[in-house]
Structures are given as structure tokens and as C-alpha cells.
Image: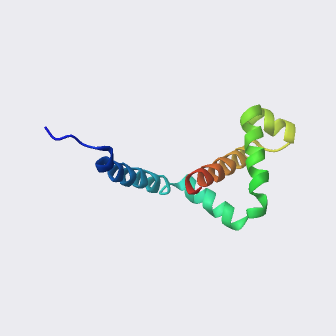
């Protein structure tokens, strides 16, 4: 029986991890986040904060308090989530 050392398996783990992270970049959510960050860098913090608030208060409650349509609140939520996803994956 041959013993496998950590040194032999580490490159395989890195390659496997790199492939997984690359697969995360091949999603619509990642693309939306990347697009928003590229086109509106000045709004990134604001949209992330608003999406976090929507998560805390709930979609219907937020839209009622902000006097906006639920669809608009959902768009903010989705944009904020996509930006956070993009930033988490891209680093």
C-alpha cells in the first residue's frame, strides 16, 4: 500500500477549488453583479445596504414603507444580492 502525502494532494485540491470558483463565475447572478459594479460603482454601497434592509424587514414591508412597488423592491433586493455574490466570488 502506498501512502499519499499532503504534498501530493495539495495541488489536486487547489485545482479542484479553482475549477469550483470558476464555475461560480458562470452564472447570471455573477454577471448581473459584475455589470452593476462596472456601470455604477458609485451606487454599490447604497444598493447593498438597501438590499440588506429589504432582507431584514421583508419585501412587502419594505415596499410599503418606501412607498414603492413590490416589483421595484424586488429588483433592488436582487441587484444587491447579485453585487454581494459577485464581490464574494471575485474577491
75 vs 11, left or right, is: right
* Horizontal and vertical percent position of residue 79: 67, 51
Colour scheme of the picture: rainbow
Q: Residue at x 62, y 54 (%)?
A: 87
17 vs 77, left or right, is: left
Quarter placement of the C terminus: bottom right
Q: Residue at x 69, y 49 (%)?
A: 80
* Horizontal and vertical percent position of residue 70: 74, 41
11 vs 67, left or right, is: left
Q: Residue at x 29, y 49 (%)?
A: 8
Viewer-proximal residue among 75 and 40? 40
Viewer-proximal residue among 73 and 23? 23
Quarter placement of the N terminus: top left
- Looking at this view, name the residue that lies furthest to the bottom: 39
Q: Which image quadrant is residue 35 in?
A: bottom right
Can the viewer see residue 72 in this picture?
Answer: no
Q: Which image quadrant is residue 2 in?
A: top left
- Vertically, is 6 above or below 37? above
Can the viewer see residue 7 in this picture?
Answer: yes
- Looking at this view, name the residue that lies furthest to the left: 1
- Vertically, is 61 above or below 79? above
Q: Residue at x 77, y 39 (%)?
A: 53
* Horizontal and vertical percent position of residue 61: 79, 32
So how many labels did they put on this image? 0
* Horizontal and vertical percent position of residue 86: 60, 54
- Vertically, is 77 above or below 83? above
Viewer-proximal residue among 11 and 82? 11
Amino acid at each position: 500500500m502506498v501512502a499519499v502525502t499532503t504534498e501530493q494532494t495539495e495541488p489536486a485540491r487547489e485545482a479542484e477549488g479553482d475549477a469550483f470558483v470558476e464555475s461560480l463565475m458562470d452564472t447570471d447572478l455573477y454577471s448581473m453583479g459584475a455589470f452593476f459594479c462596472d456601470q455604477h460603482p458609485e451606487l454599490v454601497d447604497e444598493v447593498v445596504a438597501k438590499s440588506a434592509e429589504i432582507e431584514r424587514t421583508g419585501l412587502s414591508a419594505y415596499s410599503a414603507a418606501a412607498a414603492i412597488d413590490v416589483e421595484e423592491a424586488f429588483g433592488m433586493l436582487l441587484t444587491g444580492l447579485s453585487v454581494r455574490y459577485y464581490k464574494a466570488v471575485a474577491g
